[in-house]
Structures are given as structure tokens and as C-alpha cells.
Image (cartoon, helix red, strand yellow):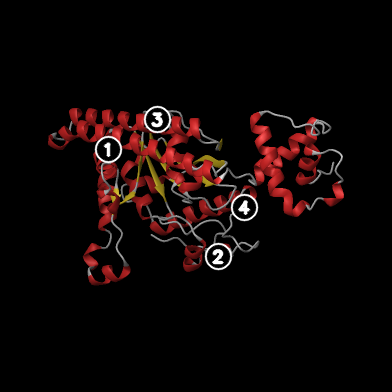
Amino acid sequence: MQLPDAAVVLRHAADPAEEDGIVDGAADDAVAAHALHFFARRGERRPGVEFLDEKLRGGIEHRLVEVGDFQPHYTTAVLRGALVLLLLLVNTLFWGGVVLIAGFPKLFLPRGELRRRFILALAWLGARWVGVNNRIFDLLLPVEWDVAGVDVDDPDGHYLIISNHVSWVDIFALFRVFHRRAAFIRFFLKSQLMWFPIAGQACAALEFPFMRRYSPDYLARHPEKRGRDLVMARRMCRRYRRVPVAVAIFLEGTRITREKQENQESPYRHLLRPRTGALAFALGALGDQLDAVVDVTLAYPAGETSMWDFVSGRLRRVTVSVRRLEVPPEFLSESGGDREKLKEWIDEVWREKDVLLDRGTLVPWSQSNEPRPASASRSES
């Protein structure tokens, strides 16, 4: 059945006697979407809409929500965003302060069972921070979390999570998806974030691995610095063998933009080139203690998304697809296996991820409908 234009439906709802022909559907579609979505969320039916059967009305409402035409009023968005940011800040300062105070004695403890228990207690506090964040999102934000394929349910296990990186929202999405399903997640973070007040020091106390990125010019002047951050990553990952952990790595190393794709000459439509250095060391350090390597594909069907879009209620839907990966045993050795083979394996994972995004997500920085040839694919370590 052909769906009527949304503006026509809205005009019928307001005045059933008005003729359809005078409605400029292209111009009024956004207004119609706003009103119909508003009525649907409040559970109301305007006079004149009842003539539509349930299948037709549901199809219209689904189309409007899916396309994301509805946007909250500017004042509502600003007030909601300010409130959510304030609550997130208060929550972070509170639990971050508790972690710092509770973690201070850890500085003087030698490696052993007592230090291990301190680390577990700090991770428990970190999980409480995640839980409160999720509660804030559920109470104040209209976002729909579309999560599929999560086959992880052991908070005492060892997991390695790899993901694409779209927005700052990704971090909160991963925390939400794996909350109470896996141990408290540790992300590979840029070293500059360690100096972020309270939160950075709390991450250090929670033993997040920090990575220092050097520019090519700096490495040319100081070649002895090359690879030092990866050595530190390996050392930190070895510590995780003694405690339950979920280590998350954004293999692209940065959030995606169209400019970055063009600069990299990325062979993927929706992704940047993956970097395999940190992954190789994490696989080698955790080795046979890994319960699973999990691939996460994050997408925002509304398009390019910022943290403000999320906290202000403009972001309506987040999709998360999760799958376990079968890791070749050679990559779990102390040396991490052959680096070129690891790159080839990750390239194949990234091609499959790109196809998945192609099927379910419209990404605004993808200009061409034709994927670049797979032969051009290469990873950056």
C-alpha cells in the first residue's frame, strides 16, 4: 500500500475537510514529522487520524522515527543537554574522587594478592559510575539502543574488544552494552587525558593503558622513542592476567571524519584504516587467558553524531552489533605472531564490518556508492 505524504496526514488531522492538493508535501514534511512523532510518544490520537488503519499508521510513525525528521525544540534541547552534562559531571567527580581516595594506598602496595584485591575493589567502584550514567540516560534521553549479538556474560572473564570509532558517544555505548556482562572496561587512552582533573587520575588508578602518540617529525628527530608506547601497552596488558578485565581498543586510533578518510585514502566506505600495533601486544600479553575477542560495530543511523547531539536528545537511535572472532592461535603467542598476517586478518574483519555498515547505516561522509577495491586495503601499525 502506498503511504500518504506525512504532511497530508497531519493536515487531515487538523482539518479533514481541507483538500490534499494544496499541501506542499516536500516543504511541510518536517513539520508533519514533528507533530506525528510528538503525538505518538504521548500516546495521543488527533481527530482525523483514526481513519488510518493500524498498519498504515504504524508504518508512517516508523518511517518518521527511522528517518529522524523529528528534532526537539531548541530550548528543550539546551536545557536537557545542560542537565545531562551536569549530572554526568557530578557523577564523574563523585566516583572519580572515591576511586582516587580508595586507590591511594595501592601506590605503596607490592604486587601480590592484596594489590589484586585493591584493583578489583576499584573496578567495582568504576562499575557503579557506569550504572549511574546508564540511569541518567534512561531517565532523561529518548535514545533507542538497538543492540544485537552480545554473547558475553562472564564478569570474571578476560575479553578483548575491538571497535570502530565514530563519536565520543562510543565510549558510553560500549560501557552500556557490556555493563554487568563483562568486567569493567579499560580503554587505550591518549596520554594527555591522564592530566584531565580527577577523571584522568581515576583512570590511572584503575590501570587504564595510556598511549603517547608522537608525530612523524618528532620520531625523525628522536628515533629512540619509536615503539615506546607499545612497550608500555604490553607491560600494562600483562598486569591484566591477574584480574578479570575487558580491554577495549578503537583500532582506527581516532574518530572518523570524511577529511581523515580522504587523507588516509581509506579503502573503506565507512571506516578508517585499522592500526594493529596495540592489538598485537594485547593479544600476545593476554594470550591463552583470553575468553574471547569481540568485534563491535557502532553506527548512528541519523548520521554524523556529536556528544551534544546525544545529551540534548537529538540522537534518537544507537545501533551496536557484536560478534565473537575466531583468532588464529599464532596471534596469541608472546610475540604476537607475524605482523603482516595480523594486518591481513584485521583487514578482512574491517571489510566485513564495512559491508555490515553498508547494509544498515547511511554515513554522510560516504560519497560514493562503489566501494574502493579491496586490493588497496592496508593497515597502519
Residue 222: mark? none
Could you say which is closer to the camera, residue 18 or residue 276? Answer: 18
Q: Which residue is mark 2?
A: 375
Could you tell me how many numbered marks the image carries? 4
Q: CA distance from mark 3 to mark 2?
A: 46 Å
- Say what amino acid the circle numbered 4 marks: Leu
The mark nearer the N terminus, 3 or 2, is 3
- Say what amino acid the circle numbered 3 marks: Val
Q: Secondary structure at mark 4?
A: loop
The mark nearer the N terminus, 1 or 2, is 1
192 on left or right of 70 = left
Say if mark 4 contacts mark 2, CB within 8 Å.
Answer: no
Locate residue 258, reporting x and y percent. Answer: 52, 62
Could you say which is closer to the camera, residue 371 or residue 290? Answer: 371
Q: Secondary structure at mark 1?
A: loop
- The N terminus appears in which quarter of the rendering? top right
62 on left or right of 275 = right
